[in-house]
Amino acid sequence: MTTLDLFGGPAEGDRDWMGPQAVILRGRALSCVDELLDALDAVVAQAPFRRMVTPGGLTIAVASTNCGALGWTSDRRGYRYGGLDPAAGRPWPAMPACFARLARQAAADAGFPDFEPDACLINQYLPGTRLSLHQDKNERDFSAPIVSVSLGMTAIFLFGGLERGDRAFKASLYHGDVAVWGGDDRLRYHGVMALADAPHERLGSQRINLTFRKAG
Ligand code: MD3
Ligand code: FE
């Protein structure tokens, strides 16, 4: 259980286990958040957020960009990882050193000492945006964990089981939280509930999520 602070949320340093190999490290990004946000601005200036299209032709509610050697994209031809930003025809921006360091250290804290991400998907949620339950299966190697960093407005995360119909439970993800999902928990269904508009003091009416993966 979480130690409640004066605001009723978790305290920096708490670890909330979502599964045997899935943990939320509360506030783990806060000590480097200024550096992260500056680096994020530089990435987004090179590769702006855009809403991608699914193979079925629907526009995805979440706006995305990437940094690192590989970026996740979706279009009419499918979901995949690739080295080029299709909007620009050039490589994705390099992964900022502070991004890679945080992802590596958080993975090690959670029991995955050798995580070397080659992809960072950056998702932007505006009020009302949701992400329906899905599995992450576009990566080559499911043995590497996924590390995700939440910034800005609070989201209610849905964490299901290995089958779509399994009951999902809810967990709030706050600015500065870092989650690590590995092992059997890596393939669990997950999603994000529609974002409520409670502007964040630093990021305003948005939530940004950095998702680090070993994709290639
Ligand atoms: C649990 N993103 O990009 S991050 C995604 O907040 C995605 O933007 C969400 O799901 C977001 O695919 C959730 C947390 C996350 C990422 C991958 C997982 C949780 C996961 C894979 C397996 C289990
Ligand atoms: Fe996902």
Image: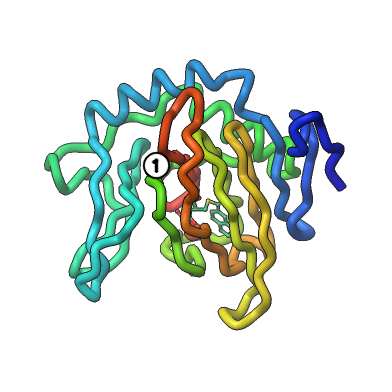
Question: Where on the picture, by quarter, is residue 89?
Answer: top left
Q: Position of residue 178 (x, y in %)?
A: 62, 39
**As displayed, is residue 154 above or below residue 6?**
below
Instruction: Give the residue displayed 47% in from the left and 57% down from the top.
Output: 194
Drawn side of residue 118 relative to residue 106, left or right: left
User: Mark 1, residues whose alpha carbon is within 10 Å: few (<14), some, or many (≥20)?
Assistant: many
Residue at the image position 23 percent from the left and 46 percent from the top: 50
Q: Is residue 130 left or right of residue 80?
A: right
The residue lying at 50 percent from left, 34 percent from top is 152
**What percent of the width, then of the height, locates residue 132?**
46, 67
How far from the left and from the top, in percent, is residue 122? 39, 42
Tag count = 1
Q: Residue at x 77, y 38 (%)?
A: 8
Q: Which residue lies under the disc numbered 1? A: 122
Q: Where is residue 179 shown, x and y percent of the image?
A: 64, 45
On screen, residue 214 above or below 41: below
Q: Amino acid at mark 1?
A: Ile
Quadrant housing residue 126: top left
Disc 1 element: strand
Q: Farthest residue toward the bottom?
A: 165
Q: Nearer the viewer, residue 183 or 28?
A: 28
